[in-house]
């Protein structure tokens, strides 16, 4: 499809589990489309060069910089933003751990960091401190010094492993 620079194109995607549509010019960054067209204002725009990580979302399950992707490239894809983390019961375990470990201050970078951490924990169930720090190195935060974030991620990883063991034991008891 060829479009003129000022032509608006309909983009349909799945945002946080719901099909959503909006219109974007071919040059519109995904982060701007999410914020201004779809109202997902938890996605923050920082450097617009993919360096700071504030705009990180999950695209088809993978942490991605939404400032490096055009809205039209998201057509038909599944996107999750920070708004997807909290449920009806309140903050997610990761968000609660960030609060408990004082892993945020101004909050500007937090949304992108949470999305990277959630994707990371989905891949690495038992991370080392070095692995967590390496993952966080893709984000710029001028407030926290990252120590609280590392503690929060390690705390959540431990709690999720313990819950998985407890669930497995419960399933074994039910099978007997």
Image (spheres, helix red, strand yellow):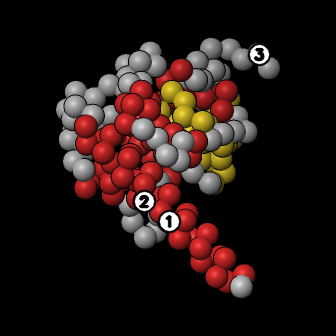
Seen in the image, is 143 located left or right of residue 59? left
Q: Are marks 1 and 2 in contact (CB under 8 Å)?
A: yes
Residue that carries the numbered disc 3 in the rendered image: 2
Measured in 3D between alpha carbons, the distance from the residue under mark 1 to the one under mark 2, in whole angstroms, is: 6 Å
Residue that carries the numbered disc 2 in the rendered image: 159
Residue that carries the numbered disc 1 in the rendered image: 163
Rendered location of residue 154, percent (x, y): 38, 47
Q: Quadrant of residue 93?
A: bottom left
Rendered location of residue 136, percent (x, y): 39, 30
The local crowd at label 2, few if under 14, some if 14 to 19, many if 20 or more residues have their Cα within 10 Å, is few
Query: What secondary structure is found at the residue carrying circle 3?
Result: loop
Which corner quadrant holds the C terminus? Answer: bottom right
* Furthest residue toward right: 1
Upstream in the sequence, badge 3 or badge 1?
3
Q: Nearer the viewer, residue 23 or 17?
A: 17
Q: Quick check: 171 above or below 123?
A: below
Measured in 3D between alpha carbons, the distance from the residue under mark 3 to the one under mark 1, in whole angstroms, is: 51 Å
The local crowd at label 3, few if under 14, some if 14 to 19, many if 20 or more residues have their Cα within 10 Å, is few
Q: Is residue 41 visible?
A: no
Rendered location of residue 64, percent (x, y): 55, 30
Q: Is residue 124 visible?
A: yes
């Amino acid at each position: 499809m060829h479009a003129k620079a000022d032509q608006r194109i309909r983009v349909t995607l799945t945002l946080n589990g719901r099909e959503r549509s909006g219109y974007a010019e071919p040059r519109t960054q995904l982060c701007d489309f999410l914020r201004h067209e779809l109202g997902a204002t938890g996605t923050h725009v920082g450097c617009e060069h993919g360096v700071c990580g504030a705009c990180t979302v999950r695209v088809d399950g993978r942490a991605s910089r939404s400032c490096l992707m055009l809205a039209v490239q998201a057509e038909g894809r599944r996107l999750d933003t920070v708004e997807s983390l909290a449920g009806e019961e309140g903050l997610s375990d990761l968000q609660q751990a960030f609060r408990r470990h004082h892993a945020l201050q101004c909050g500007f970078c937090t949304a992108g960091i949470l999305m990277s951490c959630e994707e990371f924990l989905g891949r690495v169930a038992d991370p080392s401190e070095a692995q967590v720090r390496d993952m966080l190195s893709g984000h710029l935060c001028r407030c926290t010094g990252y120590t609280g974030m590392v503690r929060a991620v390690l705390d959540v990883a431990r709690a999720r492993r313990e819950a998985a063991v407890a669930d497995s034991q419960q399933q074994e008891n039910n099978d007997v």
